[in-house]
Image (cartoon, helix red, strand yellow):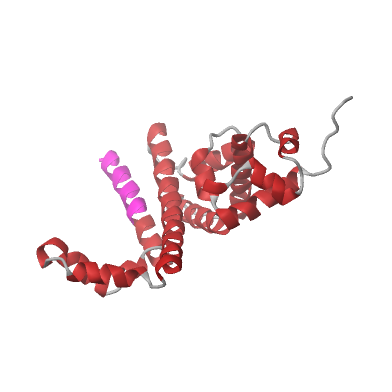
Amino acid sequence: MKKQQPQISEDRILEASWELLGEEDIEKFSMRRLADRLGIQAPSLYWYFKSKQNLYQRLANQVSKIILEEFHSEGDWKEQLTGLAVTVRSVLSRYPCSTQLMMMTLPHEPDIIRFTNRMLLCVESTPLEQAQKMQVVTTLVNYVFYFVLDDYQHERNVSAILKEQGAAPGEEVIRLLDSMSDTDAGLFRRLFTNGLFELMGTDGAFEFGLKLILLGIEQVIKEQAR
């Protein structure tokens, strides 16, 4: 007897995947948990996705498509790269674990390829060599990925410490700093007590890091023009 395709859509599977990722994080994600969320047997998912990695590819492709839809920046290469970085950060921040998914997948989906191509178009007008243009977009996107990922992980760590100890992690850091000499921790202590570490993950911190990257690119272009 021929097996029948389960009565569920690919879109619903992707939607449930995002829901699960938002609740349990990517380390706990599994096809069995996803099937339970959908009220179906795990083997039914393989009608639509050959493996969990294949599902990850499709989720990353969906993220890439949303980035492309929301990115409308015009102007010179600096304005375009700035707009692109802001858009990527915005989309990744809205979709749980999307940064990890983008980092775990290969360009084997159409919108991932379109996303990469669009990034390259941002610097096509520069006099940089082709290999340098690829390095520019790789550096930029890695900066955004790790900025979003670091902020996400920081929030998870703080929540875990609050749940486990019932106190903010800053209190424990202060106690540790008080037990250390000025030689070993003086500069760190001053930065911490002045609240500068609270700037991590903010718009201002993101914009400053992006500015450093753009100035570096501009400097390389100027040096090659000499």
- The magenta-colored residue range is 212-226
Rendering quarter of residue 223: top left
Q: Does 224 lie within the magenta span?
A: yes
- Pinpoint residue 140: horizontal percent, then vertical percent: 42, 47
Rendering quarter of residue 154: bottom left
Q: In this view, does 47 lie above or below 204?
A: above
Q: In this view, does 94 lie above or below 63?
A: below
Between 209 and 170, the one lying in front of the other is 170
Q: Residue at 45%, 53% (x, y): give it.
A: 149
Left or right: where 84 falls relative to 3:
left
Looking at the image, can residue 185 be seen? yes
Looking at the image, can residue 69 be seen? no
Q: Residue at 59%, 32% (x, y): give it.
A: 108
- Pinpoint residue 21: horizontal percent, then vertical percent: 59, 52
Left or right: where 165 falls relative to 10:
left
Q: In this view, does 206 lie above or below 21?
A: below
Between 76 and 102, the one lying in front of the other is 102
Q: Residue at 51%, 49% (x, y): give it.
A: 99
Left or right: where 177 falls relative to 81:
left
Between 30 and 62, the one lying in front of the other is 30
State whether the magenta stretch is mostly helix, strand or loop: helix
Between 219 and 49, the one lying in front of the other is 49
Considering every residue shown, the one lying at the far right of the view is 1
Q: Does 147 lie within the magenta span?
A: no
Which quarter of the rendering shows the N terminus?
top right
- Pinpoint residue 135: horizontal percent, then vertical percent: 39, 38
Left or right: where 111 falls relative to 151:
right
Which quarter of the rendering shows the C terminus?
top left
